[in-house]
Image: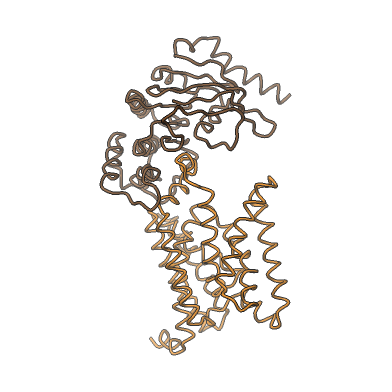
Amino acid sequence: MHLLTDPLQFDFFTRALLAVVLVSVLCALVGAWVVLRGLSYIGDAMSHAVFPGIVGAFLMKGNLLVGALIAAVLTALGIGAIGRRSGLKQDSAIGIVFVGMFALGIVMLSRAPTFTTDLSNFLIGNPLGVTPADLWGALAVTVVVGGILTAIQKELLLASFDPTEARAVGLPVRRLESLLLILIGLVVVLTVQLVGTTLSVSLLITSSAAARLLARSLKKMMLLAAALGTVGGVTGLYLSYYQDTAPGATIVLVNTAIFLAALALRRRE
Amino acid sequence: MLGVENLTVKYGPQTALENASVRFEAGTFSAIIGPNGAGKSTLLKTLVGLLPDPEGAVRFDPGHTARGCISYVPQQQTLDWGFPVTVWDVAMMGRTGRLGWLRWPGRKDRQIVEDALKETGVFDLRGRHIGALSGGQRQRVLLARMLARQGHLLLLDEPLTGVDAATQETLMALLRRQADKGRAVVMVTHDLEQARRWCDHLVLVNRRVVADGTPEQVYTTQNIEATFSTSFLGHTHAEA
């Protein structure tokens, strides 16, 4: 029992636990749509593309969420505009935009005085550095994103299952997708804090993908994804505490193991 | 109810459909027939407004707004049947366009969905995951969604493909009833026999409108040859 309670005497560990749980719930809400709509690649792109927004806000001592939100909106619009004007396939447009944005973020950060530690925080994340303000921010984003997704759930469902009928009915399918991209951008900011830019897509999709293998309905899929993400996050955090490994990457590895277990479980059915 | 005038659709250098003019009327069950690659689905998609800017015009008669009244049933195999939804969920999607934003389905919507599922004979399967259905059952679910939508213009892309013979009869009878109730029903098919039996308006298409009229007018050896053999010749020419 001490094994579980010992780390809790440190406030930073408790805060990290709370953050992991919140972000897992949030990622389950958004990740379900990312997985169902085949947006994993663009989700990964988004997690890199919001980087300059975060860095810009960090350098100007502004709100990281706002910075990321601006970058997310610009990226979502930019990918659409480049895709339409150039006639290139969307994956090329995504590739160009996200690498460009990511490089911009690194260049901006290299001008900062405390370059190396900050960069590694952004790239690898540090759940143990979560502040009380971060937690409140995470809670606010979870409520807002959850509210928006609930409000547009039936439209998203039709647009995801059958985009053709959705357009026939007159739903703004493209704008719904842009909105989803912006929400992904928001979620990514919180995951960056925990696991960093490079791994954040894992939190977004791995639990949802595992849940998709096992769940029969959308609601069950989201609940299961939230549960699996929480279990993976908490387990990973304790493991990293006792094994002294990088917490973000440990969480990602545990999530990956859970996914593989779900895959094996489904094979047997 | 609606029609296209001098419609030409190109995909890059390829002409999918050239200078097509057709009308579809309320109370009529129409079939668009032709070989693969003849532009059948292109014509249907133009009617739905899915193609950005075709040359020519799609005209709705006054009183029929384009968006409000259309229900589109896609080819079964274009959908992801592993999607985590039940039979009931899919039929309920038919209400999405009716309800509008920020409105949740009420008792009336549930009644409409229940009636639709009963009419297509899959009400007992309502709790099933859609992945567990046969091809015929899947088509019945899509038709239930179409009924729940309560559109005036029903467009169906290859509704008979992958469907067993018994279900084909049920589906055709159901679409016939919809037309008799005053709706405009338009289906794309390559099943000439079924179309001749059930439809009162046939459009033979092969990159242009080959023939357009009642089955008696259209179903001639000459027309059918012109529809189904020139595409083959056209292909060999193009490839040579």
**Relative side of A85 to A258, left or right:** right
**Is A212 or A53 nearer to us in this picture?**
A53
User: In the image, what residue occupies the spot 71% across and 26% down?
Assistant: B239
- Residue B143: name its quadrant: top left
Give how far across and how far down residue A252 sits, in percent: 54, 70
For chain B, the rendered hue is brown
* Res A57 seen here: yes
* Residue B229 vertical position relative to residue B41 in the rendered view, above or below: above
Q: Quadrant of the C terminus of chain B?
A: top right
* Res A249 seen here: no
**Is A263 or A54 nearer to us in this picture?**
A54
* Residue A219 vertical position relative to residue A83 in the rendered view, above or below: below
Give how far across and how far down residue A99 sits, in percent: 69, 62
Q: Quadrant of the N terminus of chain B?
A: top left
User: In the image, what residue occupies the spot 47% across and 82% down?
Assistant: A132
Give how far across and how far down residue A67 sits, in percent: 59, 70
User: In the image, what residue occupies the spot 60% across and 32% down?
Assistant: B54
Give how far across and how far down residue B79 sits, in percent: 47, 42
Query: Across the whole image, how many numbered discs are drawn on residues?
Result: 0
**Is B210 or B2 nearer to us in this picture?**
B2
**Relative side of B20 to B238, left or right:** left
* Residue A177 vertical position relative to residue B114 in the rendered view, above or below: below
- Residue B20: name its quadrant: top right
Chain coloured orange in the rendered structure? A
How is colour applied across the structure in the image?
by chain
**Relative side of A74 to A138, left or right:** right
**Is A149 or A2 nearer to us in this picture?**
A149
